[in-house]
Amino acid sequence: MRETIRNLIKDKRVLILGYGREGQSSFRLIDEVGGYAALDIADANKLSAAVPDNHLVIAGPEYLGCINQYDVVLKSPGIVLPRAFDSYSAYITCQADLFLQVYGKQTIGITGTKGKSTTSSLLYHVLKESGLDVIFGGNIGIPVLDMIDSIQENTIVVFELSCHQLEYVRYSCHKAILLNLYEDHLDHYGTVEKYWNAKKNLYRKQTAIDTLYVNPDFIPAKGDCPSDVITPNISELPFSSWSDIKGCMLRGTHNMLNAAFVYKVASSLGVSDADFMSALATFKTLAHRLEYLGQVDGVDYYDDSISTTVESAISAVNAIDNASILLLGGMDRGIDYDPLVDFIVESKLDLIILMYDSGHVLEEKLCNCAGPAFMDRIHYIHDLKDACAYAKQKAQPGKAVILSPAAASYGVFKNFEERGDRFKEYIFD
């Protein structure tokens, strides 16, 4: 990796675009490699971390205007460029692109609108517990360039990839997992087609000796994927339900499919059925992903704050047999809520609590398609704290309350983690 970076930046003017966790990681490695003509930083905000005086810092709302003053730009995920990246004279790349260029042949890349963190974490856990040399990084929070000193020739890399990381990649991984593609991130991409196109970069640069594991509902168009395509199926799992695995914390049909992906990939790497089942029994579910929080007065509470799509909220309700109260709503990003409205009208939920901007959208849609009797089950409560208080008041012993917002947290909370933490605080206060 250091040699690849050295060849890329030698005698070049280099810009770190975005100076969060990944930007700081890129800066450290490039500064260590050296050989550049300049190494500067541009960010929309004033930097919170100190930078040596010999590096220029460009901060403020016009920070993107300096891109073409540089030869090489390392862009952090989430930064929206005002035009197509290949229209700039600068060579724009990112950590994911550089990492796959060097380590793609030993990398398993995972993406999807929902389920990628659970699937990535589960795959890493199964491989690690089975005795394989494996590391885990990417969108889960560990910049991949921070891991390079841990990678040996036979190390397997489990790489969780977001749409933002995939948007600028020119290389692919040897094994790729595409879980699903739903409507999301329209505030960034504008159209669902542009969002899906970013995700599809996962496999577009694969070759005939590579493998794409894909949900059968999202098989690539003919000619769009050059690799071997495999479609995992729940029926192939060596168990029939989660209750077959003592101690397993996973729940729901959606997680059965996630497990089917992991089983297929792990089997291809020599993991036995016995080792696979044993690893499932010790896997701890991730926070805020249909996480069981516990009981209050005989009521079960689940935190699915990661939910930003219609499909994830529907999956959450279907996964919990005693689901009774659903908390929905957050930032309105213009997604199509009609499938969720149809689901709610047909569901056996006792109470649906709507919140924030998208809650207003859902309320209006429900009013237009449901009768007065049904609307008695719908309540709009502006903020999460009051919604939790109302849910605790109305919940019955033996039933479950689920936070699965089907909306982004931004505008009210820093991120979905903070939203989930506040939910837990309000419920157990």
Image (spheres, helix red, strand yellow):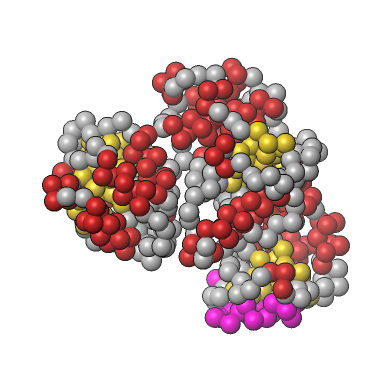
Residue 110 in the image: above or below residue 62: above
Q: Determine which quarter of the picture holds residue 55.
A: bottom right
Residue drawn at (54%, 39%), measured in percent from left and top?
217
Q: Is residue 205 left or right of residue 191?
A: right
Count of marks overlaid on the render: 0
Query: 29 or 211, which lies in front?
Result: 211
Residue drawn at (48%, 56%), measured in percent from left and top?
184
Q: Which residues fall within the magenta stretch?
A: 48-70
Residue 153 shows up from this direction: yes
Query: 423 or 224, which lies in front?
Result: 224
Q: Determine which quarter of the picture holds residue 52.
A: bottom right
Q: Is residue 217 left or right of residue 375?
A: right
Q: Is residue 61 magenta?
A: yes
Residue 337 in the image: above or below residue 218: below
Residue drawn at (34%, 48%), measured in percent from left and top?
340
Q: Is residue 88 magenta?
A: no
- Residue 68 x %, y %: 73, 79
Q: Is residue 44 left or right of residue 166?
A: left
Query: 228 or 163, which lies in front?
Result: 228
Residue 109 shows up from this direction: no
Residue 276 in the image: above or below residue 37: above
- Residue 270 x %, y %: 70, 23
Q: Is residue 114 left or right of residue 175?
A: left
- Residue 183 x %, y %: 48, 54
- Residue 353 x %, y %: 24, 51
Residue drawn at (61%, 69%), measured in percent from left and top?
18
